[in-house]
Image (cartoon, coloured by chain):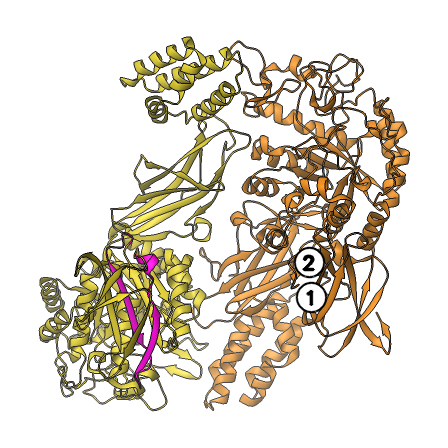
Chain colours: A orange, B yellow
Amino acid sequence: MSLAFPSAVIENLQPLIDGGRYPVKRVVGEDLTVEADIFKDGHDVVAAVLKWRTLGESIWHETVMTHVDNDRWRGVCSLYENTTYEYTVEAWTDTFSGWQHEFAAKFKAGIGNLTSEKLEGAALLEAAARRARNSPDLDRLLEISELIRNSEHAQVNDIAHSAELEVLMATYPDRSAATQYAPPPRVIVDRIEARTAAWYEFFPRSAEGRADKGSTFRDCLARLDDAKAMGFNVIYFPPIHPIGFANRKGRNNSVTSEPDEPGVPYAIGNRHIGAPNGGGHKDVEPALGTLEDFDWLQQEIRARRLELALDFAINCSPDHPYVAEHPEWFYKRPDGTIKYAENPPKKYEDIYPLNFRCENWQELWDEMTSIILFWAERGVRIFRVDNPHTKPVPFWEYLTAKVRERYPDTIFLSEAFTKPKMMQALAKAGFSQSYTYFTWRNTKQEFIDYFTELTQTEMRDYFRGNLWPNTPDILPVHLQEGGRPEFMIRAVLAATLSSVYGIYSGFELCENAAVPGREEYLDSEKYQWKARDWDRPGNIKQWITRLNRIRRENRALQRYDNLRFYSADNDAILFYGKLTPARDDIVLIVVNLDSSRRQNSYIQVPLAESGISDSEPYQMHDLLTDARYTWHGSRNYVELDPQTQPAHIFRLRRQVAGDKFA
Amino acid sequence: MSLAFPSAVIENLQPLIDGGRYPVKRVVGEDLTVEADIFKDGHDVVAAVLKWRTLGESIWHETVMTHVDNDRWRGVCSLYENTTYEYTVEAWTDTFSGWQHEFAAKFKAGIGNLTSEKLEGAALLEAAARRARNSPDLDRLLEISELIRNSEHAQVNDIAHSAELEVLMATYPDRSAATQYAPPPRVIVDRIEARTAAWYEFFPRSAEGRADKGSTFRDCLARLDDAKAMGFNVIYFPPIHPIGFANRKGRNNSVTSEPDEPGVPYAIGNRHIGAPNGGGHKDVEPALGTLEDFDWLQQEIRARRLELALDFAINCSPDHPYVAEHPEWFYKRPDGTIKYAENPPKKYEDIYPLNFRCENWQELWDEMTSIILFWAERGVRIFRVDNPHTKPVPFWEYLTAKVRERYPDTIFLSEAFTKPKMMQALAKAGFSQSYTYFTWRNTKQEFIDYFTELTQTEMRDYFRGNLWPNTPDILPVHLQEGGRPEFMIRAVLAATLSSVYGIYSGFELCENAAVPGREEYLDSEKYQWKARDWDRPGNIKQWITRLNRIRRENRALQRYDNLRFYSADNDAILFYGKLTPARDDIVLIVVNLDSSRRQNSYIQVPLAESGISDSEPYQMHDLLTDARYTWHGSRNYVELDPQTQPAHIFRLRRQVAGDKFA
């Protein structure tokens, strides 16, 4: 029987972003837990499966869903391929279970004549036998069917509830009138680095730390080795493309520059330098080297088991080849000249913004996409995208889908420091990761509220926060004022509140000189070569190295949405933790948020969540210092001196025997 | 410019049931408040309107939406027609406001040359003038445009911000690249009785209260007059159709009946009685009269400004004409005979259930729909539907839509006492009202939790709870045991917790004789004629009359989702209220939930919500007793004796002058 209307009701499917308009996100190996309300009219028994397949696959994989409570059903699958999947739920009437219950009820009530009921049961088995036609189960089903026809009530009731028959009937259900939830929502399964990574950003032209002369791609090896030693695994370069001459800016954002000044890497494009691909986004700045040098450097990066992330900044200097070849892509003033970028009354004379709604927008969108594909073909698979919120959201949906079609391993990081709904919209539209407000969260309640929103609401299904304590654009006030302890604190928070974080170089050196009254770096290397002693005394490289090692060695810290906050009496003490689902890695972090003074607190260790009874001793192993404490009960005392150790990162170890903890 | 992609992002539209799959509900004259997240990339200023129209109308009505906070926008419209509407949101870039802000920012920054900006502004006005082509505004816009071209900066800035120009530019916005939310959700606008009514249910065959002989339609006038006098406005009859002979049940649900017993009105259909339409759902039981008698009675009902509700029970007695004419619509046993209804081990031999998934289900569904249309054509527009949860939800969606197409004033009440999600699904699918768990809610916390769910969550947009303290099927334990005070309490709760409620006759007489150990009436009139003294001593008809008058005279009680609970110290005292939006009708209800003893409590009057300052005296006018108390401050004492007055229904009156309160 096939019906033109759904047989069962399947509603309130979760996860589901905007009714299925946008995909949810997972990484390879993660589970997808799907829930739905499933029910049917009358007394029929319902059965349901969770189904999933990669886009384009013709057959579905499936797993049984189980009833949780109150018509809510749940199924779980694991996704192992770095591609886009779709999933759905199928439900049908479990006629055999219905018959089983009915027969048992009537038998127990002592109803004398159950001939009709026996015949109905036998018919169900015969129908199942027809569905089992290529299997040895066919004969067995017919055999049991005969038994049911010819046995006494008590015997039929036993047969009906035998494990063998239940398994057989569950193997060949009648799903001809099944209902399937439609349309199936999608899930983008990224590779693991989309969720778990530590980024290190540096300007290759400052690699050697010389103020008098720019470094090249060939000069970057020491920086890579240093980043590698600190435990980072993604190296991120601000734009490496040719920089325009026209209206080139000088040090500290001055509107004019000296002839020898290197310019701003975000003023992209220079058609006057004879670069092989016209001098735009598909070339490299000659002061850094050639495309071959770039390829060589990428090889060196890979050899260190690091990965390169490039910056995708859609800005054109007046010298960009697009300006000459496609003036129709830009905004025009009434006199026909191309408009500069502005944020009135501010002007950016070295940059022309592109008009993503111009007449031939489709051509422009495709050209933008081709830039990503160009670098992807050269091996780059991570792109940090500059200011995506100033371009249409549908453009990003288009670009990321196009790129993923060819390179599903591509990771896009959205650098949208803007209003919350736009940040969320970009994540939904296709970005793998997003910058966050972490940079400006300071108080305990701010951390709890914001990170609960990120990791415990629907946002966790599509938005992955990549935490940055600083960027070339942002030196927040607390880093300017808090000194070395504050850098240590922000490092711990960034490295443990999320599974993905990064620092902009100089952070490890506690650089904190700002333009007075602003959150900007003084003598920012956006505008100049930067002199630096990469081993400057007072640096926190050891601290960062330790943090990254702890992240590598603790699977709980590699997950994103397992963050939970716990109680600490003192408002300056933030207490939170991450557990693996099997509770075989329990990491509890205590941070003194006050960089100026020692703070202490009683904290409430989550014993029940950790599977530890109140009377059991347990070990708190501080992974930062290697100190081990044996604690009893949930309420315990901590004290943290920001000068020496502003945080504990405890691994909670369970007692296995005598004084042994594992 | 027309784009192939949305220009603005419009997301998270509210109200929206299951992503727009189901309509929201309103009644004529109610507001529809629509909110959405609306934003756009970059610095552009956005404008938006809420649009609505009846299904089939070609043009939209619209009203301006305003920005609430954080990219959330809101618009409100009122719906006056008893039909189905659709609504949506349209947003576009407000280029004029963008230019205004830009010009002002540059002017204030003292930028010397703003020629280009002036030309841009003038061009915007000229474009608006083209859109104003059939209006006198055209010339004025061109005039101001000239002014902008030729004036000094300060003057241009003044003109740009003049109220005249702002209004002109808002009148002719450029919406050519506007984005519209799609597809538009629907809203069913019912007539007022779908939300606000008091129902009185009685069996016409027991109208005279005689056990020896059934009453007819012609005997019902006294009952109508009594119901009218008590203040009810809907008269609801259990099924009035021919009752089958086959397996007719006797008193107290006995499986056999005496020849003179009247049978169960729910065992519908008797093709052996020579009724004009075959003796099924389109005929009336001859013991009640003829179709002409029915029409006469309906006229009498209308003459009293009452309205009739009929019962739609899809049950067929073995004598129903369908059984002979459409055996294929029924379930079969293996031997080919038609199956009785069962809820194993219980059997209902006097009823055959229909198979809504049979081969020619479409024919069956249409026949069922034709039953409602038959009675609708005879003037009936309210249908209480028996056990809708044992038929497919899509069937109800089909039937209610078909009926509403022809008779949009039809009201459907779902009698689904089942699991919450099915009850919700039926409401979403098209039922105007639903029975609720009110009948079994007893403690203060149960009332607060359940009615907060009904009236303050998304449910309020599609599910209207019609409260029944009793039904012919349910005599709850508290009514069996609590005596007259309990009946008074349940009457107050039903009449004031929802805007729509009903009682099954006998309730006003405090009938409480039950089948021992069950929540069923002893000597239920489902199975027999019932002897009754309709003015039996100890009745609560005065109390009910008073309650219905209070409902009629207080608009706050006629609204559904304005219910709020307030604080009372004593767990036996429930304190809640209803306010009109303008706060010109404030009704506060205090109920002693304990029918066995006097209870007192301090209660916290919601002064701030009521717009009354802490120092202001106010009058609490008890509408049940007409007593008036002058109170000061929010904390006040109440004491309620269930024997005399188990509740206060206060109208809070504000002081207007001296000792006058209004």
- Position of B175 relative to A551 (above/below): above
Q: To which chain does the residue with label 1 belong?
A: A
In front of the other: A161 or A272: A272
In front of the other: A259 or A92: A259
In front of the other: A550 or A164: A550
Q: Marks 1 and 2: in contact by CB < 8 Å?
A: yes
- Label 2 packing within 10 angstroms: few (<14), some (14-19), many (20+): many
Residues rendered magenta in the picture: B581-610
Does the rendering let one see residue A16? yes
Check residue A573 in the rendering and tell me which mark sits there, or answer none: 2
Q: Earlier in the sequence, mark 2 or mark 1?
A: 2
Q: Amino acid at mark 1?
A: Ile
**Residue A491 location (% of width, % of height):** 76, 48
- Label 1 packing within 10 angstroms: few (<14), some (14-19), many (20+): many
Q: Amino acid at mark 2?
A: Ile
In front of the other: A605 or A143: A605
The alpha-carbon separation of the residues under discs 2 and 1 comes to: 9 Å
Tell me the residue at 38%/38% (across/down).
Answer: B65
- Position of A281 relative to B399 (above/below): above
Check residue B598 in the rendering and tell me which mark sits there, or answer none: none
| Residue B587 drawn in magenta | yes
- Position of A496 relative to A157 (above/below): above
**Residue B112 location (% of width, % of height):** 53, 12
Q: Which residue is mark 1?
A: A603
**Quadrant of the rendering where the C terminus of chain A is positioned:** bottom right
